[in-house]
Amino acid sequence: MMHSIHTNYYFSMPSMQFVLDCESMMIDVNDFALDCLGYKRKELIGVSFLAIVHEEDQNHVHKQLQCLSQVNCDDVRTLQVRKMTKRGLPLFVTDFVHVKQTEAGKKVFVINGYNMTKQKRMEQMLAAQKSILEKIAQGLPVTTILHELARTIEAIHPDTVCSILLLDEEQKVLYHGAAPSLPKEYIEAINGLYIGPNAGSCGTAAFYQEAVTVANIETDPRWRDYKHLALPHGLRACWSMPIFSSTKQVLGTFAIYHRQVYEPTEEDLEFIRTSALLAGLVLEQDQMKNEWLESKQRYQSLFEHNQDAVFSLRLDGSFSSVNQATSNISGYSREELLTMNFQLLIVPEDLDKCSKLFAKVVKGEPQNFDIRIRTKNHDLLYLAITSVPIVVNNQITGVFSIAKNITDCVVYGQRIREATDYDALTGLPKRHMFQEQVSKAISEAQQTAKIFALLSLDLDHFKHVNDSLGHTVGDIVLQQVAAILQKEIQHKGLVSKMSGDEFAILLKPIQAKEEAIDMAKRILRLFEEPLQINDINLLITPSIGIAFYPDDGIDAETLLKHADVAMHAAKRNGKNGYYVHSNEVARTTVEHIVLLSDLHKAIKNDELSIVFQPIINVLTKKIVAMETLVRWYHPEHGIIPPNQFIPLAERSGLIIQIGECIVRKALKQQQAWIQEGLKPIRIAVNVSVKELQEQDFAEKIEKALKDMKSSPEWLELEITENMMLYNEPAILNNLRRLKELGVRLAIDDFGTGYSSLGYLKRLDFDTLKIDQSFIRDCPHSHDSRVITDTIIELAHHLDMNVIAEGVENVEQLEYLAHKRCHEAQGYFISQPVNSEEAKHLLQKEMNT
């Protein structure tokens, strides 16, 4: 039959070919059609052609075939038909229907069908892309667009179910994006799916960043932990493709589910790749939109809500935009500012500077600068401005600026500088500012060949004022001294407060050195009268050192140092005077510094030693005590006299370490004598005021007694009479504690200083020591006899032991015996001796 109607040509062409009878029943079909539709020949022969037509197209095709049965042979019609494969997949086919007549005279329909599915789907995808791009342009929410994309894909492939999952990069999970046809229960079950090597199709695709096609969910190992979620909903296959951004960053996954086990064709894979690319476009556009909106909002927030003034200027300097802070700071409204030029706000003195900086910015050079403006209310403000050029299409179109109001900082800084430069108590310049003025005076003197003087002034015994009357009174004293000095100096120079109670005076210029000396004398006379403070009359005296430029130095530091050295020389000379710097003073000062360093090493290396001077009973001539004296043998300079290193130790504070060391050495030697069979004997040790000012001095003595296993009644501490001037709680507490321990207390050099008889009894002193200056002239000097006799009588009346120091002849000793002085010491009795010689003296006493 085929040959009789010449169909063999058509059946050999790559098209789906069918032969139908007038009732539309298929009587033949070619192999190409069978391959495309997935049928076997016997399944179609004798079956209505409408059986392989999509149900929505069947009525139209039936009518067309009926019409063709009425037309003449050799007529041709074209039909657009959706044919259905055996698996239920639609194919878009263009059929050319030829009306033919068989040899038997019957009409048949010979159909040549061309599969247009690929072209049709391309058209649908292009339409889908156009629709999606329009929705992106409309600014629709990303969920709406993704939902529409999924619907479109499902419409193109009706046998598929589409799913779009989005990646949470931080948590490494996939969450629901769009899946209009998936069951709600399944969507909820896989929402938050962790990505991994065996996390279904989508989790695995995101993990490996490549396509994953699973034709059979039930058997594929990648679905082992998830198939129980999919299979109950009839999901049998799943193909997934990562959704990439333009920078190859994974944004999510695009998946197509099938309700049948199904291996994808190359065409299917191309389709899913295209769909994933379209989804990536949607997501990236949304991401860019969100970033743009966020950037815009940040800029808007930075601009509108910034506490600093943010504004832009045109190239002529006029405002083009301003934020509210600009209005708040300047006092002008936004409307007013937008009609103004920025330079109208600048103070005239800064206008030239501002113009030059603005010109640099317009040339493309960003600038940071401080400027002053006048507000609408004429207030002066300081602004710190950062300005950058505005560049549009490689052209500078304006200037963008941020201005911070730094007025408070500037004012505070000025106050800080004032506090840094000037003493808060007296209002006088501080040291560094004074040094700057001295350096300036040196520069001027170098040009004029003139001289000037520096006076260093320190208040005598000022510490006593603070300690006895309190720092409030001390502050008032410093204020009054500063006022007196300023009034006297006035325009002759500059007064500075250097530190504590130390002042400095710059006298410039002077014609002769006598001018500075006369000034020092006038200052000393000013302080001859006591200061009246809170109903108290305080006699405050200064010690003044004088140095001259250029004789005593050609730089500020050297001049100040030499004036200070001269001031300390004035103090050593008895205070309340002046001293002019000399090289001899400087040399002595340097020697003292070196000696002090060596003394520190000697203490550290335990190089100090002790000697003992016997104290005898005046009547029996027996040794009753040993006074401990410190000695220092220097490895280079030999024996250093105590009157050289003890004052240094006092001033530096090293006397505290020396004192503790001597007490321990004395107690240790006392115990050594006892262990050698000698009777216990009183040991006397001198104590410095600095030691007694230490809060824990008494505790140190108590610990030394315990460590050496010594009895406190055999230890006597000698305290100078002038110590009573201090009247410090720490000193008085230490003395009371020492008496409680049982330690004996003696007042040394009695009669040369100041003491209160009340202290003698209240603190229960045991011994008075008459200073050797009175014994030296006894019994020939009437005044010395009177003082000595009075002290001895006072001791008797107070039931105190009395010792005479400095006995140098028998006549003095006999006189003391006649006046009933208890004890004596001096070179006539014995010079200080070492411990071994002292032991022999004590042994000799025991044997007589």
Image (cartoon, rainbow, N blue to C red):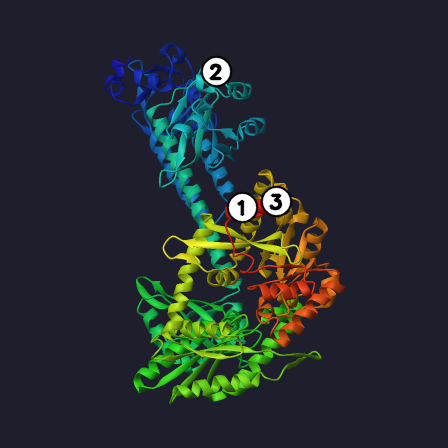
Mark in front: 2 vs 1: 1
Q: Residues within 10 Å of mark 2 (few under 14, many from 20)?
A: some
Q: Residue furthest left?
A: 9
Q: Which residue is mark 1?
A: 840
> Which amino acid, by three-letter code, is at mark 1?
His
Q: Nearer the viewer, residue 219 or 365?
A: 365
Quick check: 236 above or below 652? Answer: above
Looking at the image, is mark 2 or mark 1 earlier in the sequence? 2
> Which amino acid, by three-letter code, is at mark 2?
Glu
| Residue 236's disc number | none
Q: Nearer the viewer, residue 376 or 421?
A: 421
Residue at image coords 39%, 86%: 513
Lateral position of residue 810 relative to residue 736, left or right: left
Q: Residues within 10 Å of mark 3 (few under 14, many from 20)?
A: few
Q: Are marks 2 and 1 in contact (CB under 8 Å)?
A: no
Quick check: 739 above or below 341? Answer: above
Quick check: 140 above or below 482? Answer: above
| Residue 218's disc number | 2
Residue at image coords 73%, 58%: 764
Residue 824, given in percent of the width and then of the height, sits at 62, 60
> Which amino acid, by three-letter code, is at mark 3?
Met
**Disc 2 to disc 1, C-alpha distance:** 116 Å
**Residue 555 seen in render:** yes
Q: Which residue is mark 3?
A: 846
